Amino acid sequence: MKPTSLPRIAIAATVFSVLLLIALPKGQAETETVLYSFCSVGGAVCNDGQLPNGPLTIGWYGNFYGTTQDGGLYGDVFGLYPEPAGGCESGSNTGDGWCEFVLYSFCSVANCADGEQPSGNLAFLNGGINRPGNLYGTTYHGGANSNNVCEVIGSGFGSGCGTVFEIFPEPLSPPGCPSGTNGGNGWCEAVLYNFCSLSNCEDGTLPTGNLVADSAGNLYGTVGDGVFELSPNGSGGWNEAVIYQPTAGLHAGLAIDAAGVLYGATSGNVFKLSFSQNQWVAENIHSFNGPPDGSDPNGPPAIDSVGNVYGTTYAGGSKNHGTVWKLIPVTKGKNKGTYTETVLHSFTGAGAGEYPGGGVTLDSSGNIYSATTSGGRLECTLNVGCGTVLELAASGTTYKYKLLWRFDGTDGGFPNSSPILGSSGNLYGVTPAWGANDSGTVYELTP
């Protein structure tokens, strides 16, 4: 494994991931299948990727897409599609009824100017601009700019302060990737922005987490100390601005509602950002107080159709093993405009799971799905457990906890993101560790 400065779940369980709101049927797991185990090809180089980021993203034709922190050169963009009757196509890698293919490997150009180490999941965005939409993401390192803050000690590659990138299919006419983009395996990669382009890196460094987009095609994400906006400039380029810098440590990733309001979390708070009178206005909507409340929110929030906000904390709760929480907007009375918090579940540790990995997925019935980084089968990894997948089934205003799966290491371990729901109601997710090649897996949980 190549050296890296990007935190990993096997070392630190507070790697953050995206929270998704999926309006699809509920899924309750009875069986689990490993669809693909990473590092199945390429030997020590792991050309098919290693240490996947989650959650997965559903894109073209219902295929799944994602990124890996490592493998190839310094991270890949990969896709996964059901294996056809004739077997996986040439250039794809065979899994269990599914085929994995690498769209792009980072550090494919000099000094990793195309980016290095994808730092979050992909987002399938801007269908109104580039139909049916393209894939967008960030890399933690690489790009055109560097300073001492961004140094990758011992990597042997360009350090770089990170990028925002776009992935799209290689055009057929005229053939080949357009000028200024980088060719992959039938796909093209474009660097939309290089961080640390301004003096003293005032535009931010080391982006992590997901990207979200508003109806105008503006992109939003998080850097080490702030929230950034990336806007099309009308000439084929992009303008970047840091729109919020909280005083507390910022946690990676954002959510956006239908009105374009952004939601995120710091080390102790949940905030929202609203655009009003030509400026962004920040509002703290909840501060965590520690047990029995949550502590250390560890992922971007999820928003339902009526404005309730959901998420997880890595610690806190009745046993200090983490929580799932909900913020309900107050719409009447003297407290109108504030939020009321409810702890929906406190993790108890041991076989029931502990320390959620970052975020929840909601279905159209209000059921909640998430994952824990440890607990479950305690015979796995020195009685720590390899993690679990769970459901909080909605019944009116209450929720019932149900353990859906406990990883045992052979099928992956330490899931640090919530699963997503496919059109069939099955759950799909990734684990960044373990599996057949000790390099992570893609899994499916079937009702």
Image: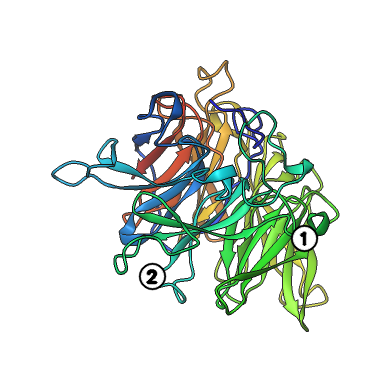
| Residue density around tag 1, few if under 14, some if 14–19, many if 20 or more, within 10 Å | few
174 to 92, vertically: above or below: below
> Of all residues shown, which one is farthest toward the bottom?
277
Residue 305 coordinates in the image, percent (x, y) = 55, 70
Mark 1 vs 2, N-terminal side: 2
93 to 301, vertically: above or below: above
28 to 200, vertically: above or below: above
> Of all residues shown, which one is farthest toward the right?
247
Residue 185 coordinates in the image, percent (x, y) = 35, 49
**Residue 132 badge:** 2
Whether residue 352 can be seen here: yes
The label nearer to you, 1 versus 2, is 1
Callout 2 amino acid: Pro
Left or right of residue 127: residue 117: right
**Residue 198 badge:** 1
Residue 339 coordinates in the image, percent (x, y) = 74, 65
Callout 1 amino acid: Leu
Name the residue nearer the viewer: 418 or 253.
253
Q: Residue at x 75, y 64 (%)?
A: 242
Q: Residue at x 57, y 15 (%)?
A: 382
Name the residue nearer the viewer: 301 or 446.
301
| Residue density around tag 2, few if under 14, some if 14–19, many if 20 or more, within 10 Å | few
Left or right of residue 34: residue 279: right
Left or right of residue 428: residue 209: right
